[in-house]
């Protein structure tokens, strides 16, 4: 795979991942959305199907890592770091594009939600704003070690599932069955481990949209919760490295 194919594939794939994943969060969260209050089950399956769609679409271009934690794990597993910067650059750009497209698709709903007197009255001066959850994750209970551990554990499950399928060997990318399995792994992590932090399990998925939230001209949007933002970056990266270590010890 060429560097241009990798960058293009990761940009398109991660943009689709965030568009559909962030889209289900917007659908469930925002006022005047037909899917409002559909619940956590809808979010978990929405993200799973987002992964499946993005992987099917771009696996032939880049192998569809779509996640810096996966990219780092594969580099540790294979000992090849040459394309890591290209992968991560595409993932970050794609995540930001996807988040911006969610805003476009739900523009009227964002305006209605953030102009509602109830929402405005609840907007904090500091900390997470009322629509930040559409863009990025946040904990239900703020406990640094627990929040970090939850992200690490969830990412180990995801990345070890990817590595043990052999999905990225020989540049073949994710196979048809592998993409479906990975999608259901994401659903499983969401249902079983997503409750404490919202299961970022992907640094680009959280950081790119958080940056977009900070930049968008959303009225009464509140803060972007930068004090928490390092956890959904560091946790998945640590989890990815641990998963690669486990794979090299147990499966290689």
Image (cartoon, rainbow, N blue to C red):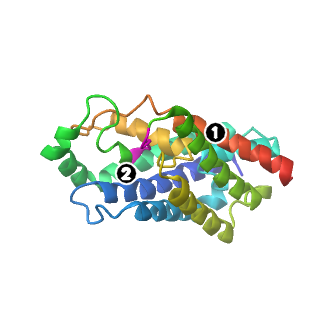
Q: Are there few (<14), some (14-19), or many (20+) residues within 10 Å of tag 1?
A: many
Please tell me which of labels 2 and 1 falls first in the chain.
Answer: 2
- Principal secondary structure, stretch drawn in magenta: loop
Is residue 53 found left or right of 163 in the rendered image?
Answer: left
What whole-number distance in Å separates the C-alpha atoms at marks 2 and 1? 26 Å
Identify residue for label 1. Answer: 237
- SS of the residue under disc 2: helix
Task: Identify the residue shown where x is 37% and y is 49%.
Answer: 134
Residue 36: where, in percent of width, then height? 28, 61
Q: Is residue 137 magenta?
A: yes
**Count of numbered tags:** 2
Residue 246, percent from left and from top: 78, 47
Q: Is residue 124 left or right of residue 61?
A: left
Q: Which residues are magenta?
A: 135-141
Q: Nearer the viewer, residue 90 or 32?
A: 32
Q: Residue at x 47, y 49 (%)?
A: 198
Q: Quadrant of residue 219?
A: top left
Q: Secondary structure at mark 1?
A: helix
Label 2, residues with CA under 10 Å away: few <14, some 14-19, many ≥20: some
Q: Position of residue 55 (x, y in %)?
A: 59, 61
Q: Which residue is mark 2?
A: 101
Is residue 44 rendered to the left or right of residue 36? right
Question: Can residue 149 be found in the magenta stretch?
Answer: no
Q: Closer to the camera, 188 or 241?
A: 188
Please report the residue visible at 39 percent of the width from the left and 33 percent of the height from the top: 225
């Amino acid at each position: 795979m060429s560097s241009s194919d990798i960058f293009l594939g990761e940009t398109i794939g991660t943009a689709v991942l965030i568009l559909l994943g962030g889209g289900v969060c917007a659908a469930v969260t925002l006022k005047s959305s037909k899917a409002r209050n559909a619940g956590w089950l809808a979010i978990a399956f929405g993200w799973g199907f987002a992964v499946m769609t993005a992987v099917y679409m771009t696996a032939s271009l880049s192998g569809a890592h779509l996640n810096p934690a996966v990219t780092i794990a594969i580099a540790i597993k294979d000992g090849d770091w040459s394309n890591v910067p290209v992968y991560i650059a595409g993932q970050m750009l794609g995540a930001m594009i996807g988040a911006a497209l969610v805003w476009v698709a739900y523009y009227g709903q964002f305006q209605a939600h953030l102009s509602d007197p109830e929402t405005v009255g609840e907007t904090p001066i500091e900390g997470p704003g009322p629509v930040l959850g559409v863009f990025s994750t946040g904990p239900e209970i703020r406990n640094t070690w627990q929040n970090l551990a939850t992200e690490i554990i969830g990412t180990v499950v995801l990345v070890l599932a990817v590595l043990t399928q052999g999905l990225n060997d020989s540049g073949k990318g994710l196979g048809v069955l592998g993409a479906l399995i990975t999608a259901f792994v994401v659903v499983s992590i969401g249902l079983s481990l997503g409750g404490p932090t919202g299961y970022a399990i992907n640094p680009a998925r959280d950081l790119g949209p958080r940056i977009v939230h900070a930049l968008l001209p959303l009225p009464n949007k509140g803060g972007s919760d930068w004090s928490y933002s390092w956890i959904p970056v560091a946790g998945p990266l640590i989890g990815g490295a641990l998963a690669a270590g486990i794979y090299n010890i147990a499966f290689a």
